[in-house]
Amino acid sequence: MQNVPKAASPAANDVFITRTVNFPRELVFRIWTDPQHLPQWFAPNGCSIHFEQLDIRPGGRFHSCVHTPDGKDCWCVGEYLEIVSPEKIVYDIAIADEAGNRRTSAQAGMDPEWPDETLVTITFHAPDTGRTEITIHQAAPADIARRTGAYPSWLQMLDRMEAALRD
């Protein structure tokens, strides 16, 4: 299995997505860290997410499954490494099976070039009152993320997050 260093430097070809939303930073941060809200939007369009475990705190772990419309399940495990309210969330995420055992991309039937584990950093900036700039940095090659659907999945999840904030 590949290991991603916990303090990996951003690579120029990593996934970087920035979006500004018309909601206060504290509210946006809360929807990312509230176990009641996260499952409502944290999956791409047409998919749903189920958390076997969700402990949103530094050192807390998660075990989740994204259910796709075609019946394929995508299981992951990870650990929250840093949470600074309302500024930043850092976690690692690894491909897993239903029991929570780590798997390689190839073992999971995914593109074998996709990293088995990645580091995700989400930052929340308040450029002005009532607006939040969200930046997602995933330590994974952007070209592979576009090819596998990971990149557009982030965009769809951000759309769903905004819709959930409006509700």
Image: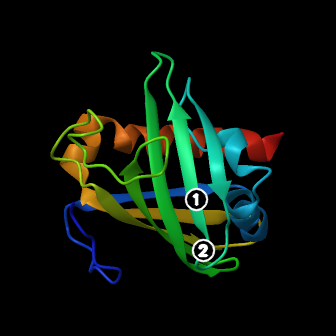
Please determine whether, in this image, residue 52 is positioned above or below residue 59: above
Name the side, left or right, on which 35 lies relative to 96. right
- Whether residue 37 sits left or right of residue 156 in the image: it is right
Residue at image location 75% in from the left, 42% down from the top: 164
Give 132 or 91, whichever is nearer the viewer. Answer: 91
Give amino acid for label 2. His
Name the outermost residue toward the right: 167
In percent of the image, x 27 and y 71: which residue is there?
4
The residue that label 2 is drawn on is: 125
Lower position in the chain sequence, tag 2 or tag 1? 1
Q: Which quadrant would the C terminus be assigned to in this image?
A: top right
Q: Please give left or right for residue 48 compared with residue 24 in the image.
A: left
Left or right of 14 in this view: 80: right
Where does the N terminus fall, quadrant-wise?
A: bottom left
Front-lying residue, 100 or 84:
100
Q: Is residue 44 visible?
A: no
Q: Amino acid at mark 1?
A: Phe
Up the image or down, 148 lies above or below 86; here it is above
> Residue 9 lies in what quarter of the image?
bottom left
Cβ–Cβ below 8 Å for labels 2 and 1?
no
Q: Residues within 10 Å of mark 2 (few under 14, many from 20)?
A: some
**Residue 145 in view:** yes
Q: Which residue is mark 1?
A: 62
How far across and how far down the image is residue 37, in percent? 76, 49
Report the residue at 25% width, 44% height from top: 105
Percent position (x, y) of residue 135?
A: 48, 64
| Residue 148 drawn at (x, y percent) | 27, 36
- Asked if 132 appears above or below 74 in the picture, the reply is below
Real-space CA distance between mark 2 and mark 1, rounded to the nearest whole angstrom: 25 Å
